[in-house]
Amino acid sequence: MSEIKKIGVFTSGGDAPGMNACIRAVVRTAIFKNIEVVGIRQGYQGMLECNFWDMTARDVGNIIHIGGTILKTARCLEFKTAEGTKKAYENLKAHGIDALVAIGGDGTANGADRLSRTFDIPVMCIPGTIDNDLNGSDFTLGFDTATNTVIEAIDKIRDTAASHDRLFFIEVMGRDSGCIALHAGIAGGAEAVLLPERETAIDELIEKLSSQAKNKKTSSIVIVAEGDKNGGAYHVAARVKEKFDFYDSKVTILGHLQRGGSPSSFDRILASRLGFAAVKALLNGRTRQMVGLRGNAIVLTPLEEALNISHFKLEDDLLEMINVLSI
Ligand code: ADP
């Protein structure tokens, strides 16, 4: 059995709905197993500033349904330096923290990997990002909630688009990943989706919209992923308008509202499973793993493998369907 007596848990990088449910699962699983838990506020910044919180099971009550993260999150450049990583480790040791659960995106996991390799402290990483861009899990925490938020917005925009016979360009988040765009495009019934993973020429988009208009469509919705190479929804809309003015067109950038909100049941259950599994894996002597979901099973993937492939692969059938179901 392991020597772990005190686990540190933190959230870092971009916040995502479900992080609180995950913190709750980590804290309660550890306490159930007679392990102490320290919440580290503001991610790596908090490690450098000893922003530590000795947590009880009651500290994570009434947070399962709340978006954001009670531990706060931050981006910290100092931690990336050799001195910063050393200082973080020394502060953890001074507080008796002998293992870590990191909840965040690829940057967070890279940081945990580096800390663990350099100072031999066990770490488990939980994929917490709405972008769904990590190789270690079919779904990352927050992706489902964010996609549902986008769909809710599309549904509302559809009402006005249909009433005015308009063409709407809706820009969604995801950084270099088109996952939110593609899933929301399918679930929201979009006419076209522009993705970073698959370039769409503006002429090709115009061709598609024209043929749909000839097919008696009176309004259209185009989803533009923020990482799409055409330069964002405003730019795409302006370029389409130059050659195609069948519809009055409008642009909506959904922005940060996609990051907030109460987590969906899927994200709450995923968060609970991942947090529970992360603590159990640490106590079983595992380290430097991404805890993720594959099919409907919780699996551990070595961090070097989880982080090596930058792009989560989009589903081929969804990509094909976008064109078929929007005729
Ligand atoms: P995310 O975890 O959402 O991808 P970031 O990329 O901003 O968010 O990473 C969060 C934090 O993780 C950074 O502010 C930094 O402190 C740390 N970090 C990121 N990349 C590295 C790295 N290569 N080495 C060490 N620390 C890193």
Image (tube, helix red, strand yellow):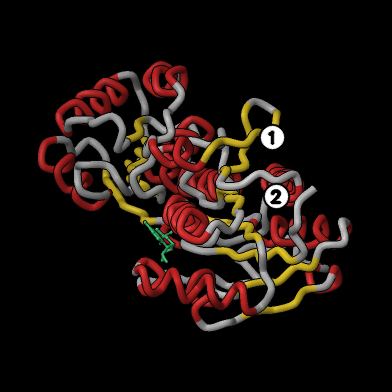
Give the numbered dot on residue 224: none
Q: Which sits in the foreground, 217 or 15?
A: 15
Q: Which sits in the foreground, 61 or 198?
A: 61
Residue beneath disc 1? 298
Residue ID at (41%, 16%)? 324
Q: Is residue 18 left or right of residue 113?
A: right
Residue ID at (20%, 48%)? 231
Residue ID at (76%, 51%)? 2
Mark 2, Cα crowd under 10 Å, few <14 / some 14-19 / many 20+, is many
Asked which secondary structure carries label 2, the reply is: helix
Q: Is residue 253 visible?
A: yes
Q: Is residue 90 left or right of residue 274?
A: left
* Amino acid type assigned to the residue bearing label 2 in the image: Leu
Quick one: quadrant of the C terminus? top left
Q: Ligand 1 within 8 A of label 2's CB?
A: no
Q: Ligand 1 within 8 A of label 1's CB?
A: no
Query: In the rendered view, would you say 92 is above or below 141?
Result: below
x then y, percent, for residue 79: 41, 70
- In terms of image quarters, where does ligand 1 lie? bottom left
x then y, percent, for residue 267: 67, 47
Residue furthest to the left in view is 242
Residue beneath disc 2? 282
Query: In the rendered view, would you say 24 is above or below 189?
Result: below
Q: Is residue 221 visible?
A: no
x then y, percent, for residue 164: 38, 45
Mark 1, Cα crowd under 10 Å, few <14 / some 14-19 / many 20+, is some
Q: Is residue 69 left or right of residue 132?
A: right
Query: In the rendered view, would you say 93 is above or below 9?
Result: below
